[in-house]
């Protein structure tokens, strides 16, 4: 209900404004009405041209950025390592380092051969053929 009364009041005020503006417009001389009409049309065209010019300038600035065509980088070439080291490190022949290296190789071998899965820990097979009928 309250919404309808608000609409009615708005429409009444709108009609009042319309009659006042129409009264002012009809009260003008024909030459003045023509002049105001021409001024309104010129003003509208100017605003439209300014907006159009702003859009064109914006597009022109955007298109001035150089287009960079993506290129695929060349594949990296793998260089073979030299067969012999001309100047080996002093740790290359150290007995403690050689022992650590052999222990590491042994641990790696045991880890590679380790069986991680346990067959005994698998869940039992379920029978999915279930009938609820009597």
Image (cartoon, grey):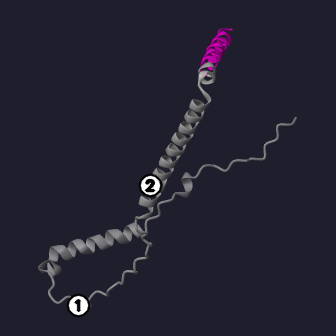
Q: Which residue is mark 2?
A: 58
Q: Is residue 11 magenta?
A: yes
Q: What are the residue bounds of the magenta stretch?
A: 1-21
Secondary structure state at the residue bearing disc 1 = loop
Q: Residue 48 appears at what percent x and percent y? A: 53, 46
Residue 6 lies, with reference to residue 117, above or below; the image says above
Residue 37 lies, with reference to residue 126, above or below; the image says above
Q: Which residue is mark 1?
A: 84
Query: Would you say the magenta stretch is mainly helix, strand or loop?
Result: helix
Q: On the rendered image, what quadrant is the N terminus found in?
A: top right
Secondary structure state at the residue bearing disc 2 = helix
> Is residue 120 shown left or right of residue 99?
right
Q: Residue at x 49, y 47 (%)?
A: 51
Q: Residue 94 appears at what percent x and percent y? A: 14, 78
Q: Residue 71 appears at what percent x and percent y? A: 43, 75
Q: Quadrant of residue 18?
A: top right
Q: On the rendered image, what quadrant is the C terminus found in?
A: top right
Q: Is residue 111 magenta?
A: no
Q: Quadrant of residue 120?
A: bottom right
Front-most of residues 54 and 105: 54
Q: Residue at x 57, y 39 (%)?
A: 38
Q: Residue furthest right?
A: 134
Q: In front: mark 1 or mark 2?
A: 2
Q: Residue at x 40, y 77 (%)?
A: 73
Give neighbour class at mark 2: few <14, some 14-19, many 20+ (Cα, 10 Å).
few
Q: Residue 59 appears at what percent x and percent y? A: 47, 57
Nearest to N terminus: mark 1 or mark 2: 2
């Amino acid at each position: 209900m309250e919404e309808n009364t608000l609409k009615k009041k708005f429409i009444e005020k709108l009609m009042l404004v319309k009659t006042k503006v129409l009264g002012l417009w009809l009260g003008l001389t024909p030459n003045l009405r023509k002049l105001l009409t021409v001024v309104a049309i010129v003003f509208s065209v100017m605003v439209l041209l300014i907006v159009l010019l702003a859009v064109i300038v914006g597009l022109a600035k955007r298109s001035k950025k150089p287009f960079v065509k993506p290129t695929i980088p060349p594949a990296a070439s793998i260089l073979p390592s030299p067969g012999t080291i001309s100047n080996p490190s002093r740790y290359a022949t150290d007995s403690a380092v050689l022992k650590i290296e052999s222990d590491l190789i042994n641990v790696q071998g045991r880890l590679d051969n380790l069986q991680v899965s346990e067959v005994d820990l698998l869940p039992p097979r379920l029978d999915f053929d279930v009938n609820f009928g009597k």
